[in-house]
Image: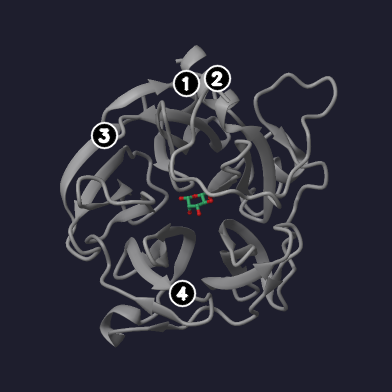
Amino acid sequence: MSVKLINMPSLPNIPWEERPAGSSHVLWRYSKNPVIKRDEMPHSNSIFNSAVVPYQGHFAGVFRADNTSRVMDIHSGLSEDGLKWTFDPDPIVFQGDPEVTAFQYRYDPRVCWIEDRYYVTWCNGYHGPTIGVGYTYDFKTFYQMENAYLPFNRNGVLFPRRINGKYVMFSRPSDNGHTPFGDIYVSQSPDMEHWGFHRWVMGTSLPWCSTKIGAGPIPIETSEGWLLIYHGVLTSCNGYVYSYSAALLDIDKPWKVIARAKPYLMSPQMIYEQVGDVQNVTFPCAALVDGDTGRMAIYYGAADTVTGLAFTHVDELVDWVKENA
Ligand code: BMA
């Protein structure tokens, strides 16, 4: 690999399929997509926009499931291979201050290993959407901390290590509805509860994401900068279209963009991405990476209904971002 991965452990059992014969695209979909179907929990209407991490030689995750009452909540899950999942049919119950843990809605989780635990961030209903923050050691007991920001905010995504001694998080300030605007910012915190030093990272300057953007999976540290995969929205005459692409950010000042690809990496083109509860959505929330080979598996929500999986190589993706910037 020309591109070096930094602080990325081996993941020999990463879910993986080689690029299909005849394809030259940098990203390719799992042949058995959707990897998670809508009804894999007893009362789920849909399972999508979910986060997966390596855990004890296998995989664990936090999954967005809307139930058949259309309550939006998050559930833990375990998997041997990252493909077939055993979900907790009951939503996560957080330990913590009842003023903060009181449930309104929870969706779009991300999971990030930092130092000694798995942090979970999600869009948390607290008199409007904001960023909930919690953590777990074992995917059984979950603890909730203070909300990171005031409403309205979404797409809170942590960096996997402190930068200059501070925890760092992306977010996307928004409104109370189907926000028709939104740029990516980063904020810093000494303790994971007090967030400040807000910096603007990037906005909606490209046609495929001219309405709004939001960070996706946990950024990946490479010799060429932080590799950020992010979703972006185009407003068509038939509504929003959610695609995703990638950018490279400065390692010490991640609000400085080194390169940002002009094209999307994936847009809704398969029937399970185009048709569902919300049409035309591909929404990535997690990526697994094998530190030895650079193989990468991206989990993305499809049409707000099911979960898809796509593959690439980190070094090819970094080269693609630079070549297409
Ligand atoms: C966003 C979020 C996502 C969802 C997307 C498309 O605002 O609500 O959870 O996937 O809209 O509906």
Element on which disc 4 rests:
loop
Q: Is residue 141 above or below residue 259?
A: below
Q: CA distance from mark 3 to mark 4?
A: 30 Å
| Residue at left offset 82%, top offset 41% | 31
**How far apart in space, not on screen, are marks 4 and 2 (Cα)?**
36 Å
Which residue in the protein does label 2 denote?
320
> Which of pointers 4 and 1 indicates the residue nearer the eye?
4
**Residue 76 x, y percent position in the rendering:** 57, 72
Mark 1, residues whose alpha carbon is within 10 Å: few (<14), some, or many (≥20)?
some
- Report the side of 152 relative to 225 (left or right): left
Point out the tag, 3 or 4, that comes first from the N-terminus. 4
Judging depth in this view, the residue of 286 and 122 nearest the camera is 286
Q: Residue at x 49, y 36 (%)?
A: 5
Q: Which residue is mark 3?
A: 255
Asked if labels 1 and 3 touch by Cβ distance under 8 angstroms, the answer is no
Q: Position of residue 132 (x, y in %)?
A: 35, 66
The crowd level at tag 3 (other Cα within 10 Å; few <14, some 14-19, many 20+) is: some
**Separation of residues labelled 2 and 3 (CA atoms):** 21 Å
Q: Residue at the far right: name it.
A: 21
What's the residue type where badge 4 is placed?
A: Tyr
Q: Which residue is labeled 1 in the image? A: 261
Asked whether disc 2 touches disc 1, contact meaning CB atoms under 8 Å apart, the reply is yes
Marked residue nearer the N-terminal end (2 or 3): 3
